[in-house]
Image (cartoon, rainbow, N blue to C red):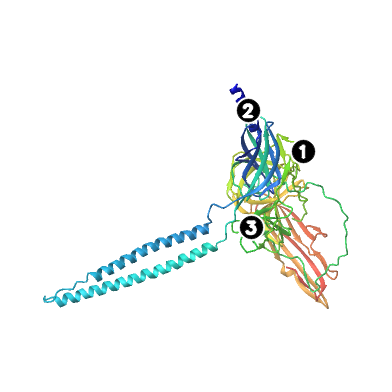
């Protein structure tokens, strides 16, 4: 009877224990990362071992840049996720800064030297005391008394003098080291205080009906990660296919290292606007162009090499590593290194560069030269804690932000499907809104589609949270191409090799930067841009020295004449093209005929050869040159204008 009563009294206690709220902390590790053109999605595994009942679960040590609106959790049928929220945690930085360690090392070195000097000084003082206590002089009466007395006096005098000199040197060094230590301690005190390390924590309320050992899936997106397309275009022989190596230059500063993770490179961007644009009224207003009456530039020979470099600093002038530098509306870009420096090949016709960094106001700077230095100001924003209770389904709360041709570029989208919300528990899933690693990617069949493409890397991948990018080889293609040359000798006396590719959409290529190799010789680095609406993709492969181009003024046929207040100027040019290759080549040569911006200036073309496009002001020749063949072309123009107007013709 007593045992039965004890058993009955114990039942409520056991029942209450199984229903109690249990607080536990679970560790997680990154399993997979999908990096986009802008941003990345991180997938984590969270091993769990739970007893029946309600549990308050904390998942700590996540990146402070976690976008709470993209947080998703996924479990199994055995787990009901009742609520999810995120918060911040702060801990003091355990590691001393390099500067602090250096100062402390200097202080310790000084203290060790002081101890040695003080010991030396003590020995000298004891030796001096011993000499003074034991200065016995020779007795009188001996034949050598005077001589021995003189020797003893000289010994005492010289040794005491040496001890005093050595003691003075030691004291001076002690004073000097003392000042260095005091100054070092002062510097140590004035060092800026290390900010506490910020981390994100995820808090889950979980209900389980039986003891389980399972794995939760946790995924979220971060902004401070991206990849840039890079290519190697290799031509081993102009009668062989073009080899294209497709690479990804990946960088991340998310505050958490990616160690031995499964890597997926996605050509889309989750931050790209997914809504169609809205048509609004287009208002126009009168515009009056202004001309410079006394100085008109015609046929400018300025040549832009497309290279832009510089340094990005903060408001205090300190270098900013990891700043994203982009050519707007393209996937061409780079990130600044640890010294805030960058270098970028910019396509001709680009007007601006865009600079962005977490915690800083974005900057758009006009391309006004080859050197562009930028200062970025802090953007102070407070991230509020997100709390959601009982939202079922897979919900989407992602914030979206709505060379002579003007290409239309098609870029992919990556979004999460929107879901409904209601106040119930969730069963199963829960949603809230240049070192090359030789890793080959595997993909599905190569067919053109406006949707994003993914490259799954076969081997595990590691990348620290650091501005320095890491390159991965995604794919290699052997592409049939027709090779030809293009020359615009008025601006550049070189023939540029071009590859023309049909059915190029299957290659899934984005705008990027390309390294050019011709017959195993590196020719340079250029921006690569494609025209989505053209059936043939034309790739510039750089200048070929084996096809020579000359451009000279024919002086006998060029000159200036005056007729009252009128002026006539003739310019005739001779173009020579030589094929030094061992097989025939096709060369397209283009020259410019100036077009006047004022009615008082008249232009007439000289010569009949070539195809003249009067609207564009170009003359084009299509040449087929045999080995060692030289073709000579002539072109020119006549200008008539008031003598008071100066024209720049060269």
Residue 209: image location, x then y, percent:
67, 30
Q: Does residue 244 appear in this view?
A: no
Residue 308 lies in what quarter of the image? bottom right
Q: How many marks?
A: 3
Residue 171: image location, x then y, percent:
38, 69
Would you name the residue on which mark 2 appears?
9
The quarter in which the C terminus is drawn is bottom right
Q: Nearer the viewer, residue 555 or 429?
A: 429
The label number, if any, that marks residue 423 in the structure image? 1
Label 2 secondary element: helix
Would you name the residue on which mark 3 appears?
343
The quarter in which the N terminus is drawn is top right
Q: Nearer the viewer, mark 1 or mark 3?
A: 1
Q: Residue at x 27, y 69 (%)?
A: 129
Q: Earlier in the sequence, mark 2 or mark 3?
A: 2
Marks 2/3: CA distance? 77 Å
Residue 599 against residue 481 in the figure, above or below: below
Circle 1 packing at 10 Å, graded few (<14), some (14-19), many (20+), is few
Circle 2 packing at 10 Å, graded few (<14), some (14-19), many (20+), is few
Q: Nearer the viewer, mark 2 or mark 3?
A: 2
Marks 1/2: CA distance? 37 Å
Q: Residue at x 28, y 69 (%)?
A: 128
Label 1 secondary element: loop
């Amino acid at each position: 009877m007593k045992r039965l009563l004890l058993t009955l009294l114990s039942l409520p206690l056991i029942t209450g224990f199984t229903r109690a709220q249990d607080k536990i902390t679970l560790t997680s590790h990154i399993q997979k990362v999908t990096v986009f053109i802008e941003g990345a999605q991180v997938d984590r595994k969270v091993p769990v071992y739970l007893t029946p009942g309600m549990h308050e679960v904390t998942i700590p040590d996540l990146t402070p840049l976690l976008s709470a609106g993209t947080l998703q959790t996924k479990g199994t049928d055995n787990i009901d996720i009742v609520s999810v929220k995120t918060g911040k945690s702060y801990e003091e930085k355990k590691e001393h800064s390099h500067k602090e360690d250096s100062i402390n090392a200097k202080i310790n070195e000084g203290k060790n030297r002081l101890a040695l000097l003080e010991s030396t000084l003590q020995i000298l003082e004891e030796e001096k005391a011993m000499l003074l206590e034991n200065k016995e002089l020779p007795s009188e009466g001996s034949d050598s008394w005077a001589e021995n007395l003189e020797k003893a006096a000289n010994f005492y005098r010289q040794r005491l003098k040496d001890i005093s000199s050595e003691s003075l040197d030691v004291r001076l060094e002690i004073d000097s080291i003392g000042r260095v230590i005091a100054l070092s301690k002062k510097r140590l005190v004035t060092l800026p205080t290390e900010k506490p390390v910020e981390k994100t924590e995820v808090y889950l309320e979980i209900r389980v009906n039986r003891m389980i050992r399972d794995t939760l899936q946790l995924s979220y997106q971060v902004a401070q990660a991206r990849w840039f397309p890079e290519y190697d275009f290799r031509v081993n022989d102009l009668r062989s296919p073009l080899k294209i190596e497709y690479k990804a230059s990946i960088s991340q500063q998310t505050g958490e290292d990616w160690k031995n993770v499964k890597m997926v490179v996605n050509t889309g961007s989750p931050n790209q606007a997914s809504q169609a644009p809205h048509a609004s009224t287009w208002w126009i207003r009168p515009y009056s162009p202004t001309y410079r009456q006394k100085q008109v530039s015609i046929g400018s020979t300025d040549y832009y090499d497309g290279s832009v470099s510089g340094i990005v600093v903060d408001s205090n002038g300190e270098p900013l590593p990891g700043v994203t530098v982009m050519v707007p509306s393209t996937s061409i870009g780079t990130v600044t290194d640890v010294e805030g420096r960058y270098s970028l090949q910019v396509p001709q016709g680009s007007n601006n560069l865009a600079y962005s960094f977490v915690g800083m106001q974005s900057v758009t700077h006009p391309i006004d030269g080859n050197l562009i230095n930028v200062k970025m100001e802090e953007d102070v924003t407070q991230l509020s804690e997100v709390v959601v209770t009982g939202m079922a389904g897979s919900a989407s709360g992602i914030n979206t932000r709505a060379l002579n041709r003007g290409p239309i570029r098609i870029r992919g989208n990556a979004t999460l499907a929107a879901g409904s919300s209601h106040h119930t528990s969730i069963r199963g899933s829960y949603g809230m809104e240049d070192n090359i690693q030789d890793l080959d990617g595997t993909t599905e069949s190569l067919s053109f589609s406006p949707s994003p493409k993914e490259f799954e890397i076969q081997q595990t991948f590691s990348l620290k949270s650091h501005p320095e990018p890491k390159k991965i080889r995604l794919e290699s293609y052997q592409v049939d191409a027709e090779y030809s040359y293009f020359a615009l000798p008025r601006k550049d006396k070189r023939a540029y090799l071009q590859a023309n590719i049909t059915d190029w959409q299957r290659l899934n290529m984005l705008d990027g930067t390309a390294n050019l190799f011709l017959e195993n010789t590196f020719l340079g680095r250029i921006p690569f841009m494609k025209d989505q609406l053209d059936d043939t993709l034309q790739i510039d492969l750089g200048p070929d020295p084996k096809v020579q181009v000359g451009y000279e003024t024919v002086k006998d046929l060029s000159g200036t004449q005056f007729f009252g207040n009128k002026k006539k100027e003739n310019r005739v040019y001779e173009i020579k093209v030589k094929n030094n290759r061992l097989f025939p080549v096709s060369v397209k040569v283009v020259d410019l005929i100036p077009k006047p911006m004022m009615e008082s200036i008249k232009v007439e073309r000289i010569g009949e050869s070539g195809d003249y496009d009067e609207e564009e002001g170009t003359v084009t020749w299509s040449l087929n040159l045999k080995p060692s063949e030289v073709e000579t072309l002539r072109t020119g123009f006549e200008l008539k204008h008031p003598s008071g107007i100066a024209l720049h013709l060269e």
